[in-house]
């Protein structure tokens, strides 16, 4: 992908086990094939290796949590706004579960909003094409 499309920034502020996790995040809205492969590799790594790629050795909760963290590691934009606690610990899976879950929920909500916007833009483009076609037909008929 030549230009990565990121979501608007959003903030989280969570306290888990007496430690505060706060910061601003932005997510990639569109993933490349390479991103998908990286997510798969990370998920398998978090679950213990390639022999669990199908989830046969992991229960549903472990598989879901590994999927969430692997997607977040790939999708979170790493920039000056990204909190240090994320950049230093996320890739190793060294974060409290509620933090991962909160970020995953936010990413799902952002994906849903982005999909709605994409569909609205597609519908608007189709409408414009239809209107242009109808106008051209009327103009050609009137000649």
Image: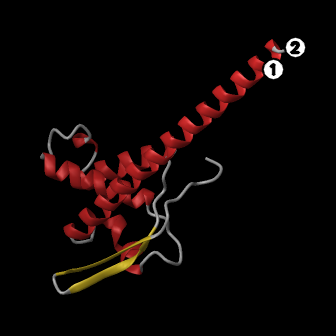
- Where residue 128 is drawn, which disc sits there? none
Picture coordinates of residue 105, whole percent (x, y): 29, 59
Picture coordinates of residue 130, whole percent (x, y): 64, 26
Residue 83 sits in which quadrant? bottom left
- Which part of the image, by quadrant, shows the C terminus? top right
Q: Is residue 89 above or below residue 112?
A: below
Q: Is residue 45 above or below residue 120?
A: below
Kindly identify the residue that appears in the image at 47 percent across and 69 percent down: 9
Relative to residue 114, is residue 130 drawn left or right? right
**Depth check, front residue: 70 or 26:** 26
Residue 54 sits in which quadrant? top left
Relative to residue 61, is residue 120 drawn left or right? right
Tag 2: Cα neighbours inside 10 Å, few (<14), some, or many (≥20)? few
- Where residue 139 is drawn, which disc sits there? 1
User: Please, which residue is most extreme toward the right here?
Assistant: 143
Residue under label 2, please give it. Answer: 143
User: Please, which residue is most extreme toward the left here?
Assistant: 59
Q: Is residue 36 above or below residue 92?
A: above
Marks 1 & 2, CB-CB < 8 Å contact: yes
């Amino acid at each position: 992908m030549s230009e990565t499309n990121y979501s608007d920034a959003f903030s989280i502020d969570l306290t888990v086990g007496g430690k505060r996790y706060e910061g601003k995040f932005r997510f990639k809205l569109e993933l490349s094939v390479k991103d998908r492969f990286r997510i798969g590799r990370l998920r398998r790594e978090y679950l213990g290796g390639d022999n669990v790629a199908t989830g046969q050795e992991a229960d549903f909760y472990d598989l879901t949590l590994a999927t969430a963290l692997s997607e977040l590691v790939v999708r979170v934009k790493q920039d000056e706004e990204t909190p240090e606690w994320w950049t230093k610990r996320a890739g190793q899976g060294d974060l409290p579960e509620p933090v991962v879950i909160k970020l995953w929920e936010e990413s799902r909500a952002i994906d849903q909003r982005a999909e709605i916007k994409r569909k609205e833009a597609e519908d608007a483009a189709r409408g414009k094409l239809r209107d242009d076609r109808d106008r051209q037909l009327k103009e050609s008929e009137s000649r």
